[in-house]
Amino acid sequence: MNKKIKSLSSKIVFLIAVVTLSSILLIFNLFEKINKEAFYTIEMEKAQLVLSTIEPLIAVNIYLNLNDRIDQVTKQLVTNPNILSIKVLQSNQVINERKSKEFEDNIDDSFVVSTPIFQPNSKKEIGTLILTYSNKNYKKLIDRYTTLLIKVLFVFGIFFLLFSLYVKRLLSPLRRIARLLKGYSPDTNINIPFDNQNNEIGFISNALNNMQHSIMQYSNELQKVNSELEVKIKQEVEKNKQAQEQVFKSEKLASMGEMIGNIAHQWRQPLSVISSGATGMLVQKQFGNLSDENFEETCNLINDHAQYLSQTINDFRNFIKGDSKPVLFNLKSDTDSFIKLVAATIKKHNIQVVFDLDENIELEGFPNELLQCFINIFNNSKDALVENNPENERYISISEKIENNSIIITFQDNAGGIPEDIIGKIFEPYFTTKHQSQGTGLGLHMSYSLIVSHMKGSLETFNKTFMFNNKTYIGAQTIITLPLENKHT
């Protein structure tokens, strides 16, 4: 059965209304006797007197364009405690403004006066002078009557005291509830008393107890949802990580396929030399014409080409196995390995490669991953050169140097550059301008990830115009920046 709530707020509002109305009527009657208008007029005249005094001086300085003198005058004026600010305008433009230290604290208790500035010996208006004047004197007058007001209100203070004690007694349950709620959290259950009172306090207590119960239920459900969501997020992150690793492996396998084609092309001539040398010795042996000198020379030739084939296999094997941890390596040697792997492609497409390398640069990092980046950058330049340039004008320059305690590796081609609307997207995953059968769009993204995440460097590409062989070209310039002292996690 619902009980009728007795309104506690009505009692408080009624008492406050009576006391407030009585106080307002008394204060109004007291201040009505004070001639506010007269005092305000006096203060306004003081402000106008200040303006009329300094206006000729300001006018002369404006006319003579003596801004420093104007600044000195305004600076001196704001030392007057009654002047909060002064502003000088010429052609509706502020040419000088000065504020006193008390401006911000007293701006609400002030008034503004202004006067036109006339050209000396003329009635031509050349500006405006604006003064912000303090009402401190007005406050002093009010303070005089405050003493009288306090005396009058002393009697009312006794009534207010009794009233406040009554209100305090009425509101004491609310204060206790507030103290209890101060330490509330969804994990704790606070028992709010006073729920048996037949007034607003009892209604609030019941509502708070019910609200706590609902919040605890929602909190438990939310924790359960968060736990399930966290598990799902971890699962999805792991799936994405595995998928990205698989795609990276696919990209490397594609590079491996191209490298195998390059190696097959590189091996043709050494194998032909080995075969010819062995066959020649066999024929000479059969006819008895094999001399010791020919035998030794042919064997050395076969051995040199066999060593070349072996080194090619080592380079390819190192490229395949990758790096498990950072090592100290020579950048020139890593670049040489890269050139060996793409030598057949360079020859096939008639690309002229220009080098500017420092043989003494050594760094700590992942040489095979850096080699993979070189191949990806080279392949992009190669594809653009084959598509856009004739065979006798295909250039790629590679430079390596140390600058500002960083290693700078630059690839520059003359394939015409990258369109400005896509150059900012080339390092994004799966972004490619090639047909789907020609590329996955992961080569440069993988390079970016290897350089930035693994080797703590940066990878950027720009379009650049340059001179080569007395001719102007434009092409893509890719810059790899690596710290000279790399630290890896």
Image (cartoon, rainbow, N blue to C red):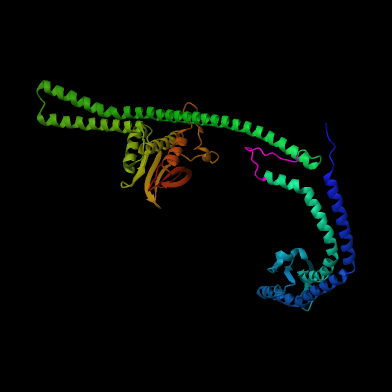
* Residue drawn at 22 percent across, 27 percent down: 274
Q: Does the magenta stretch include residue 112?
A: no
- Image quarter of residue 66: bottom right
Q: In this view, does 130 lie above or below 312?
A: below
Magenta portion: prevailing SS class: loop
Kindly give the residue lying farthest to the top in the view shown: 286
User: Which quarter of the figure is the C terminus placed in?
Assistant: top left
Q: Who is closer to the viewer here, 34 or 93?
A: 34
Q: Is residue 94 left or right of residue 276?
A: right
Q: Give the range drawn in magenta.
A: 182-194
Q: Is residue 191 magenta?
A: yes
- Image quarter of residue 375: top left
Q: Can residue 141 be seen in this view?
A: yes
Q: Can residue 347 be seen in this view?
A: no
Q: Where is residue 69 in the image (x, y as percent from the top left)?
A: 67, 76
Q: Where is residue 254 in the image (x, y as percent from the top left)?
A: 41, 28
* Residue drawn at 30 percent across, 30 percent down: 266
Q: Is residue 297 left or right of residue 248?
A: left
Q: Is residue 10 left or right of residue 262?
A: right
User: Which quarter of the figure is the N terminus placed in?
Assistant: top right
Q: Who is closer to the viewer here, 277 or 160?
A: 160
Q: Position of residue 51 (x, y in %)?
A: 78, 74
Q: In this view, does 394 lie above or below 34?
A: above
Q: Who is closer to the viewer here, 376 or 72?
A: 72
Q: Is residue 140 left or right of residue 283?
A: right
Q: Position of residue 142 (x, y in %)?
A: 82, 69
Q: Who is closer to the viewer here, 43 or 240?
A: 43
* Residue drawn at 83 percent across, 33 percent down: 2
